[in-house]
Amino acid sequence: MPDIRVQFANPEHLEACMELENIPLRRVIVAKIQAQDVVIALWNHEVAGYLRLEYLWGKVPLIGLIRVREERQKQGLGRCLLSFTCKHLQSQGHTFLLSSSSAHEPEPQTWHRQQGFRECGILLGVNERGQSEIFFRRPL
Ligand SMILES: CC(C)(COP(=O)(O)OP(=O)(O)OC[C@H]1O[C@@H](n2cnc3c(N)ncnc32)[C@H](O)[C@@H]1OP(=O)(O)O)[C@@H](O)C(=O)NCCC(=O)NCCS
Protein backbone atom coordinates (compact mmCIF):
# COMPACT_ATOMS: atom_id res chain seq x y z
CA MET A 1 0.00 0.00 0.00
CA PRO A 2 1.42 3.43 -0.92
CA ASP A 3 1.72 6.10 1.77
CA ILE A 4 -0.62 8.91 0.64
CA ARG A 5 -0.67 12.30 2.38
CA VAL A 6 -2.43 15.52 1.48
CA GLN A 7 -1.22 18.85 2.85
CA PHE A 8 -0.50 22.47 2.00
CA ALA A 9 2.69 22.84 -0.02
CA ASN A 10 5.65 24.50 1.66
CA PRO A 11 8.75 26.13 0.09
CA GLU A 12 10.64 22.82 -0.06
CA HIS A 13 8.03 21.56 -2.59
CA LEU A 14 8.53 24.48 -5.02
CA GLU A 15 10.46 22.53 -7.70
CA ALA A 16 7.97 19.66 -7.71
CA CYS A 17 5.09 22.13 -7.87
CA MET A 18 6.65 23.93 -10.85
CA GLU A 19 6.77 20.62 -12.73
CA LEU A 20 3.01 20.21 -12.41
CA GLU A 21 2.18 23.90 -12.99
CA ASN A 22 1.28 25.62 -16.21
CA ILE A 23 2.33 29.04 -14.90
CA PRO A 24 6.08 29.43 -15.62
CA LEU A 25 6.55 32.32 -13.15
CA ARG A 26 8.26 31.04 -10.01
CA ARG A 27 7.51 34.19 -8.00
CA VAL A 28 3.76 33.64 -8.55
CA ILE A 29 3.94 30.07 -7.23
CA VAL A 30 6.18 31.11 -4.31
CA ALA A 31 3.50 33.63 -3.31
CA LYS A 32 0.70 31.07 -3.74
CA ILE A 33 2.56 28.57 -1.54
CA GLN A 34 3.12 31.26 1.10
CA ALA A 35 -0.61 32.11 1.06
CA GLN A 36 -1.57 28.42 1.57
CA ASP A 37 -3.26 28.41 -1.82
CA VAL A 38 -1.43 25.26 -2.97
CA VAL A 39 -2.45 21.76 -1.82
CA ILE A 40 -0.33 18.74 -2.74
CA ALA A 41 -0.78 14.98 -2.60
CA LEU A 42 2.34 13.03 -1.62
CA TRP A 43 2.65 9.45 -2.87
CA ASN A 44 5.39 7.75 -0.88
CA HIS A 45 6.77 11.25 -0.08
CA GLU A 46 6.81 12.34 -3.76
CA VAL A 47 4.56 15.12 -5.02
CA ALA A 48 2.09 13.34 -7.30
CA GLY A 49 -0.89 15.69 -7.18
CA TYR A 50 -1.32 19.45 -7.19
CA LEU A 51 -4.19 21.87 -6.60
CA ARG A 52 -3.91 25.66 -6.85
CA LEU A 53 -6.68 27.82 -5.40
CA GLU A 54 -7.64 31.21 -6.73
CA TYR A 55 -10.25 33.66 -5.46
CA LEU A 56 -12.55 35.37 -7.95
CA TRP A 57 -12.98 39.04 -7.03
CA GLY A 58 -10.71 38.27 -4.09
CA LYS A 59 -13.39 36.20 -2.32
CA VAL A 60 -15.02 33.38 -4.34
CA PRO A 61 -12.85 30.21 -4.25
CA LEU A 62 -11.99 28.68 -7.62
CA ILE A 63 -9.71 25.76 -8.49
CA GLY A 64 -7.18 27.42 -10.79
CA LEU A 65 -5.51 24.09 -11.53
CA ILE A 66 -5.83 20.50 -10.38
CA ARG A 67 -3.40 18.00 -11.83
CA VAL A 68 -2.32 14.48 -10.92
CA ARG A 69 0.78 12.89 -12.47
CA GLU A 70 -0.34 10.70 -15.34
CA GLU A 71 1.00 7.48 -13.83
CA ARG A 72 -0.90 8.20 -10.56
CA GLN A 73 -4.26 9.14 -12.08
CA LYS A 74 -7.53 7.32 -11.24
CA GLN A 75 -6.19 6.13 -7.90
CA GLY A 76 -8.04 8.59 -5.72
CA LEU A 77 -5.47 11.42 -5.46
CA GLY A 78 -7.72 13.98 -7.18
CA ARG A 79 -10.54 13.07 -4.78
CA CYS A 80 -8.19 13.45 -1.77
CA LEU A 81 -6.93 16.87 -2.97
CA LEU A 82 -10.51 18.04 -3.40
CA SER A 83 -11.65 16.70 -0.04
CA PHE A 84 -8.78 18.45 1.83
CA THR A 85 -9.50 21.70 -0.01
CA CYS A 86 -13.26 21.54 0.66
CA LYS A 87 -12.70 21.01 4.41
CA HIS A 88 -10.25 23.92 4.51
CA LEU A 89 -12.67 26.23 2.67
CA GLN A 90 -15.58 25.16 4.89
CA SER A 91 -13.53 26.03 7.97
CA GLN A 92 -13.03 29.50 6.46
CA GLY A 93 -16.80 29.95 6.10
CA HIS A 94 -17.11 29.36 2.35
CA THR A 95 -20.28 27.64 1.12
CA PHE A 96 -19.35 26.70 -2.45
CA LEU A 97 -16.35 26.10 -4.70
CA LEU A 98 -15.94 26.83 -8.41
CA SER A 99 -13.78 24.98 -10.92
CA SER A 100 -13.46 24.82 -14.68
CA SER A 101 -12.34 22.67 -17.55
CA SER A 102 -11.74 23.18 -21.24
CA ALA A 103 -14.87 22.36 -23.26
CA HIS A 104 -12.96 20.06 -25.60
CA GLU A 105 -11.70 17.75 -22.79
CA PRO A 106 -14.49 15.33 -21.75
CA GLU A 107 -12.40 13.39 -19.16
CA PRO A 108 -11.91 16.18 -16.61
CA GLN A 109 -15.54 17.20 -17.13
CA THR A 110 -16.68 13.68 -16.19
CA TRP A 111 -14.41 13.75 -13.13
CA HIS A 112 -15.88 17.08 -11.96
CA ARG A 113 -19.45 15.77 -12.27
CA GLN A 114 -18.49 12.60 -10.40
CA GLN A 115 -17.08 14.72 -7.56
CA GLY A 116 -20.33 16.62 -7.06
CA PHE A 117 -19.70 19.62 -9.32
CA ARG A 118 -22.50 20.85 -11.57
CA GLU A 119 -22.10 22.97 -14.68
CA CYS A 120 -22.81 26.65 -13.97
CA GLY A 121 -21.62 28.53 -17.03
CA ILE A 122 -19.36 28.76 -20.01
CA LEU A 123 -16.85 31.35 -21.18
CA LEU A 124 -16.74 31.31 -24.95
CA GLY A 125 -13.50 31.35 -26.89
CA VAL A 126 -11.10 32.08 -24.01
CA ASN A 127 -8.64 29.24 -24.60
CA GLU A 128 -6.04 28.52 -27.24
CA ARG A 129 -7.52 28.08 -30.72
CA GLY A 130 -10.74 29.73 -29.50
CA GLN A 131 -11.92 26.82 -27.33
CA SER A 132 -14.41 27.55 -24.57
CA GLU A 133 -14.11 26.96 -20.82
CA ILE A 134 -16.89 25.23 -18.85
CA PHE A 135 -17.38 26.34 -15.23
CA PHE A 136 -18.58 24.10 -12.41
CA ARG A 137 -19.97 24.78 -8.93
CA ARG A 138 -19.94 22.45 -5.93
CA PRO A 139 -21.66 23.11 -2.60
CA LEU A 140 -19.36 22.67 0.40
C1 LIG B 1 -8.85 15.27 -13.48
C2 LIG B 1 -7.84 14.70 -12.48
C3 LIG B 1 -7.33 15.82 -11.59
C4 LIG B 1 -8.55 13.63 -11.62
O1 LIG B 1 -7.65 13.12 -10.66
P1 LIG B 1 -7.51 11.53 -10.42
O2 LIG B 1 -6.62 11.34 -9.26
O3 LIG B 1 -7.13 10.90 -11.70
O4 LIG B 1 -9.01 11.13 -10.07
P2 LIG B 1 -9.51 10.23 -8.85
O5 LIG B 1 -8.83 8.94 -8.90
O6 LIG B 1 -9.47 10.98 -7.58
O7 LIG B 1 -11.03 10.07 -9.28
C5 LIG B 1 -12.06 9.80 -8.36
C6 LIG B 1 -13.09 8.96 -9.02
O8 LIG B 1 -13.37 9.39 -10.35
C7 LIG B 1 -13.05 8.35 -11.30
N1 LIG B 1 -12.48 8.98 -12.46
C8 LIG B 1 -11.30 9.62 -12.54
N2 LIG B 1 -11.12 10.13 -13.79
C9 LIG B 1 -12.23 9.78 -14.48
C10 LIG B 1 -12.65 9.99 -15.80
N3 LIG B 1 -11.90 10.62 -16.68
N4 LIG B 1 -13.85 9.52 -16.20
C11 LIG B 1 -14.63 8.85 -15.32
N5 LIG B 1 -14.28 8.61 -14.04
C12 LIG B 1 -13.10 9.09 -13.64
C13 LIG B 1 -12.11 7.43 -10.58
O9 LIG B 1 -12.18 6.12 -11.08
C14 LIG B 1 -12.64 7.51 -9.16
O10 LIG B 1 -13.83 6.74 -9.04
P3 LIG B 1 -14.26 6.09 -7.63
O11 LIG B 1 -14.48 7.22 -6.68
O12 LIG B 1 -15.50 5.36 -7.98
O13 LIG B 1 -13.11 5.22 -7.23
C15 LIG B 1 -6.64 14.00 -13.20
O14 LIG B 1 -7.11 12.95 -14.00
C16 LIG B 1 -5.76 14.95 -14.01
O15 LIG B 1 -4.77 15.46 -13.50
N6 LIG B 1 -6.07 15.17 -15.30
C17 LIG B 1 -5.24 16.01 -16.15
C18 LIG B 1 -5.34 17.49 -15.78
C19 LIG B 1 -6.75 18.02 -15.85
O16 LIG B 1 -7.45 17.77 -16.81
N7 LIG B 1 -7.17 18.78 -14.81
C20 LIG B 1 -8.53 19.30 -14.70
C21 LIG B 1 -8.73 20.63 -15.31
S1 LIG B 1 -7.96 21.95 -14.40
Image: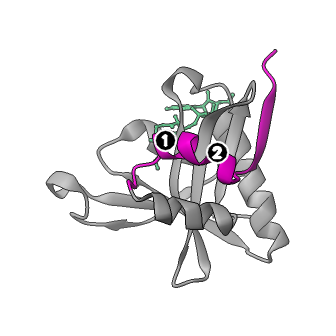
x, y percentage for residue 79?
68, 40
Task: Give the distance between the C-alpha atoms of the residues marked 2 and 1, in whole angstroms.
Answer: 11 Å
Q: Residue at x 35, y 65 (%)?
A: 122
Residue 20's mark? 1
Looking at the rendered structure, the kind of residue marked 2 is His
Mark 2: is the Cβ under 8 angstroms from ligand 1?
A: no
Q: Residue at x 57, y 67 (%)?
A: 31
At 49% across and 46% down in the image, what residue appears? 18
Describe residue 12's horizontal placement relative to residue 18 as left or right: right
Ligand 1 occupies quarter: top right
Residue 37 in sight here:
no
* Vertical comparison of 82 with 34: above or below: above
Work out whether residue 32 can be spotted: yes
Please identify the quadrant where the C terminus is shown. bottom right
Nearer to the camera, 31 or 40: 31
For image coordinates 81% across by 24% down, the residue present is 3
> Is tag 2's residue or tag 1's residue first in the polypeptide sequence?
2
Q: Secondary structure at mark 2?
A: helix
Residue 118 magenta: no
Badge 2, how many Cα within 10 Å: few under 14, some, many 20+? some
**Location of residue 63 in the rendering, given as x and y in whole percent from the top left corner:** 55, 60
Q: Which residues are magenta?
A: 1-24
User: Which kind of residue does numbered mark 1 sit on?
Assistant: Leu
Can you identify the residue that label 2 sits on? 13
Q: Is residue 2 magenta?
A: yes
- Looking at the picture, the colour scheme in use is one colour
The 10 Å Cα crowd at callout 1, few under 14, some 14 to 19, many 20 or more, is: some
